[in-house]
Amino acid sequence: MRATTVAAGVRGTRHARQGAPSQDHFAAFSAPFGVALIVADGAGSAARGGVGAALGVRAARAALRQSEAGSVDDCRAACEVARARLHRAAAGAGRPPRDFATTLIVATLTEAGAAVAHVGDGAVVAKGAALAVLSAPDVGAFAGETTFLTSDSEIRTATAPATALAVFSDGLERLLIEAASGAPAPVFDRWFKILQEGAAGHDHALSAALRRYLAQPAVAERTDDDVTLCLAVRC
């Protein structure tokens, strides 16, 4: 399957002021089944949340690279592999698993459509006949509250016929999901159209342009959190 992927992340102004690294980690890559997008956001309250996010993405990526189908079961299995990796890391460091707490989104785009496995906040938008939120943020009763991979939280899954896919961390939720309706922002249609005109494979030039977009003051004015966005379009 021919597809174009684009991905970028920018450290939020809050972490910049603190001199702290971004807690977001991500991957966008081709696989035998099509393409995969992975986004993790380490818990700010966790001592090693950023490490947990990096380890989770790495483990999920390795698991999906061995997948032939890129099915929803494969996405779920990749999350389970990542969860086990974080528990091993915690045990090796003599720390509780919550010190490595992170969210995780694993999504694939194949000839059959889109599949996702998801723990925590952040979201997935898919385009088939129309734009739709394929997997919404899992939020708690209080602002900023969510679930993490290191707990026993359910791994939520979803599938849909789709030709384009977007995965993003919670820093972009207010910008990319309409507050009143819960619908995706119309800008996704424009982004997906741009990707269709890009080169097959990972488009580094468009990824650099996306990073510049995310680094705009207009984005920082609406969120001080780290922001990550991964996009894929079937050619």
Image (cartoon, helix red, strand yellow):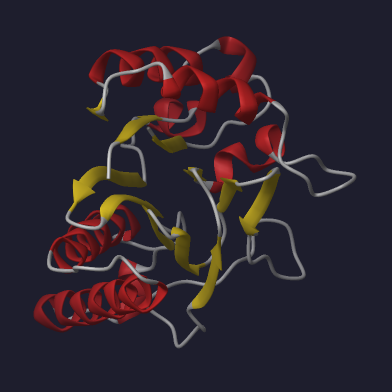
In which quadrant will I find the N terminus? top left
Q: In the picture shown, does residue 30 fall above or below 15?
A: below
Where residue 51 sits in the image (x, y, percent)?
24, 56
> Of residues 120 and 4, which is closer to you in this image?
4
Residue 235: x percent and y percent? Answer: 37, 32
Q: Is residue 98 above or below residue 229?
A: below
**Left or right placement of residue 58 versus residue 117 in this view:** left
> Of 33 and 187, which appears nearest the observer?
33
For residue 17, what is the image quadrant? top left
Q: Residue furthest bottom?
A: 152
Where does the image place residue 109, in percent across and percent down from the top left?
A: 39, 52
Residue 33 in which image quadrant: bottom left
Residue in the image at 60% along x and 20% along y:
190
Residue drawn at 57 percent across, 52 percent down: 123
Rendered residue at 50%/83% (across/down): 153
Residue drawn at x 19%, y 52% as measured from the top left: 31
Image position, residue 146 (x, y; %): 60, 67
Residue sitting nearer the eye, 86 or 202? 202
The vertical placement of 126 against 76, above or below, is: above
